[in-house]
Image (tube, rainbow, N blue to C red):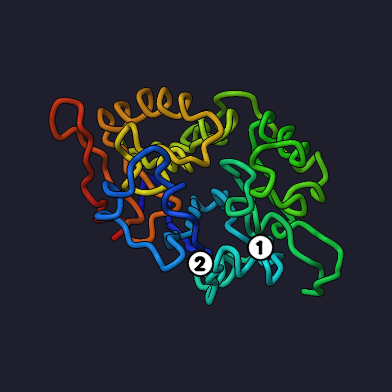
Amino acid sequence: MQLGDFEITPILDGHFRLDAGSLFGIVPRVVWQNKVRSDERHRMRLAIRCLLIRNGKRTILIDSGQGNKYSEKFRERYTVEQPVTLLDNLRDLAVKPEDVTDVINCHLHFDHAGWNTIREDGNPEGKLIPTFPNARYWSQRGEWERARQYSTQRDQASFEPNDFLPLEQPRWELVEGERRVLPEIELIPVPGHSLYTQAVVISAADRKVAFLGDLVPTVHHIPYAWIMAFDLHPVETLATKRRILPRAVREKWICVFDHDPDVPAARIIEERDGILGVIPAEEFA
């Protein structure tokens, strides 16, 4: 879609599967099973969706997908489907890796930071190098520091250190709290999934597009109490949703969902008495 001077394009880096019960936390199976499909291993198929923003001067990638550095065991565990990669889709949009000026990681789990690095010359044992050699990589400082101590974290299995440790620290733009990448592009902390995950809001022409990351990974997570068991701080997630989602309603944000396999984006609306619903965003249909 066109938003002022910005061309905004959702881009897939394939799909993967996670345990459906864990995706919906304390919500009983009898409630969520009528809304989503799960396989024989009780896993839900999820998209890995990134967002490309271009204005002729900057080429900004929000999240970098799952990458290509995983093992066969990893591929089997998560049923990785990647017939077309993020880089393939960027190529189809005439975007070369060296064209990317900024990579904004909402957080540093493997499905959000995978293409931060690649193996040189495609050699599985080759040196790790930045996928986007001219880019600044944006992260909350707390998330960067947390990720570097991944071996002590409850979510340690979600980190792939090769996605971030090989990058020289000067490549990182480590921020604390709210920050603007450009006057129209704002980073907003949305704690809960971790204490230092961030969302991105693009504002232009009296309209807003928001990439909320894992605060609201699918349309099914819009109700306040539908919170993933993967969230390290679920009470904080609830507080953040109660702060952010009413603003999304008031300001008529188009919200991009990073993991919804069917709905790339929608407007969140208040249907009645504080109950939230969605209207699919035709701009991203």
* SS of the residue under disc 1: helix
Residue 60 visible in the displayed image: no
- Residue 147, given in percent of the width and then of the height, sits at 72, 39
- Sequence-wise, which precedes: disc 1 or disc 2? 2
Determine which quarter of the picture holds residue 182. Answer: top right
| Residue underneath mark 2 | 14
Q: Is residue 222 left or right of residue 52?
A: left
Per the model, the C-alpha gap separating discs 1 and 2 is 18 Å
Q: Residue at coordinates 33% horizontally, 51% vertically from top-left? A: 265
Q: Position of residue 31 (x, y in %)?
A: 26, 46
Identify which amino acid the numbered label 2 is placed on: Gly
Quarter of the image that includes the N terminus = bottom left
Q: Is residue 106 visible?
A: yes
- The residue where tag 1 is placed is 97
The residue sitting at 82% across, 60% down in the picture is: 128
Q: Residues within 10 Å of mark 1 (few under 14, many from 20)?
A: some
